[in-house]
Image (cartoon, rainbow, N blue to C red):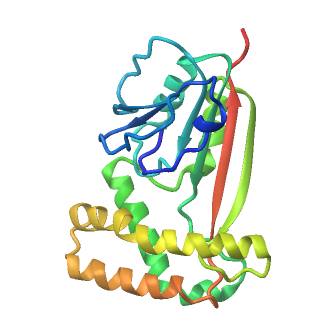
């Protein structure tokens, strides 16, 4: 499950398995491995699959879910005994381990407004830190939570984090419009020129390596009991 367009590499390396992928719109490519299929459906609707799954992956769902408890319950119901459910999601909160974040006033304002608007809209963002509890409450066992630091730009000294920040900087700059415009104009009533001005300031801050912003990426997974 994912609201984003993604490149999937699981099917080619697991030829004996079948990998259905859920999406709201028919935007998928036609040239895919024979064990990969795309289904146009809404994962917030009632799931009506004929066979249980061994593995269900949910990625980057922030702003797309009105009832996480129901979503997790449906995943639990549609897993075979011993099957696994996995969340991979970023917390929307802008993090910083020093005081350089004071120079990111526009980015902090975008963060605050998007969280506020998503709450009013009924699909709250920034709740990845609750995924572990959601899985435990639904009855999953062997629940694990792994948290990773994702820099907003290549400011880190660590080579791996620097490379990660380089790619995430591009991701952030290109995705600001998608995350912000509809919520800020339709929900908060901002004029489009106001949004453009705020996002231009946020992009300038993302390009500033002297501002040490990062996000927390949550990888949470749990197993349906065998009996």
Image-based side of 85 in relation to 19, left or right: right
- Vertical placement of residue 74 versus 202, above or below: above
Q: Residue at x 26, y 81 (%)?
A: 194
Question: As drawn, which residue projects farthest toward the right?
Answer: 158
- Say which of 33 and 80 sits in front: 33
Task: Report the side of 138 relative to 39 (left or right).
Answer: right
71 left or right, relative to 56: left
Q: Position of residue 153 (x, y in %)?
A: 61, 79
Quadrant of res 94: bottom right
Point out the image quarter for the C terminus.
top right
Q: Could you tell me residue 41's position as x and y percent?
A: 34, 31
Location of residue 214 (image quadrant): bottom right
Residue 71 placed where, x, y %?
48, 31
Q: Nearer the viewer, residue 174 or 211?
A: 174
Q: Residue at x 65, y 61 (%)?
A: 216
The answer to whether residue 196 is above or below residue 144 is below
Q: Is residue 87 above or below residue 103?
A: above
**For the point 71% across and 83% down, which residue is it?**
98
Task: Return the x and y of residue 129 as percentages of the image width and height.
Answer: 62, 50
Q: Residue at x 48, y 50 (%)?
A: 6
Tell me how many marks there are. 0
In this view, the residue in front, 52 or 99, is 52
């Amino acid at each position: 499950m994912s609201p984003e367009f993604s490149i999937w590499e699981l099917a080619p390396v697991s030829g004996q398995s079948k990998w259905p992928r859920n999406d709201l719109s028919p935007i998928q490519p036609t040239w895919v491995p024979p064990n990969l299929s795309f289904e146009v459906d809404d994962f917030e609707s009632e799931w009506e699959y004929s066979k249980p799954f061994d593995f269900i992956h949910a990625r980057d769902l922030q702003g797309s879910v009105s009832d996480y408890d129901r979503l997790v319950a449906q995943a639990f119901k549609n897993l075979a005994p011993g099957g696994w459910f996995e969340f991979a999601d970023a917390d929307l909160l802008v993090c910083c381990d020093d005081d350089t974040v004071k120079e990111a006033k526009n980015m902090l304002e975008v963060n605050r407004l998007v969280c506020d608007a998503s709450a009013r809209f009924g699909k709250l963002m920034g709740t990845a830190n609750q995924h572990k509890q959601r899985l435990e409450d639904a009855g999953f066992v062997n629940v694990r939570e792994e948290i990773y630091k994702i820099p907003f730009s290549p400011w880190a000294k660590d080579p791996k984090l620097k490379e990660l920040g380089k790619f995430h900087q591009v991701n952030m700059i290109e995705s600001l419009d998608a995350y912000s415009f509809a919520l800020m104009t339709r929900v908060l009533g901002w004029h489009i020129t106001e949004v453009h001005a705020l996002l231009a300031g946020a992009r300038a801050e993302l390009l500033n390596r002297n501002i040490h912003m990062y996000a927390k990426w949550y990888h949470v997974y749990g197993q349906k009991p065998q009996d």
